[in-house]
Amino acid sequence: MSNAKEIIIRPLVTEKTLKSQEDNNVVVFEVAKNVNKTHVKQAIEEIYNVKVEKVNIVNTKPKTKRMGRYVGKTSAVKKAYIKLAEGSNITILGDK
């Protein structure tokens, strides 16, 4: 992947991710399927100008969901949990 904007798809904003951001300085992003920890670290440092301490990647499998008699699946997502260095932070909700 050549472009940092292609690696980072979007930030994941849930109650759990906001709590981890407040407590542990960990931010969660959805990333492209074919990237590794090194690509994610370089992309975050390039886009947000912060120092990344650690990156953990989780592949979530699709879950089966039903709406009445119709059965479908949720999409598979690759998440990156990014631990920022002390003194660095990323404001996700304040971006306008």
Image: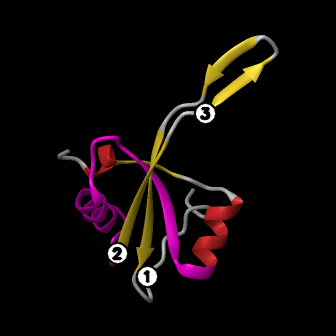
Q: Which residue is mark 1?
A: 88
Say which of 58 and 18 sits in front.
58
Above-or-below relation of 42 to 51:
above
The x, y position of residue 60, in whole percent, is: 50, 44
Q: Position of residue 23 (x, y in %)?
A: 62, 81
Q: Is residue 92 magenta?
A: no
How crowded is the residue under tag 1: few (<14 C-alpha within 10 Å), some, or many (20+)? some
What amino acid type is highlighted by mark number 2? Answer: Val
Image position of 5 (left or right of 91) = left
Asked whether the beta carbons under mark 1 and mark 2 sit within 8 Å of each other, the answer is yes
Horizontal and vertical percent for residue 88?
Answer: 43, 82
The foreground one among 4 and 36 is 36
Q: Nearer the viewer, mark 3 or mark 1?
A: 3
Kind of residue indicated by mark 3:
Lys
C-alpha separation, residue under disc 3 versus residue under disc 1: 35 Å
Pointer 2 residue: 52
Vertical position of residue 6 compared to residue 68: above or below? below
**From mark 1 to mark 2, how far is it between C-alphas?**
8 Å
Magenta stretch: give its range: 23-51
Residue at (27, 64) in percent of width and height = 46
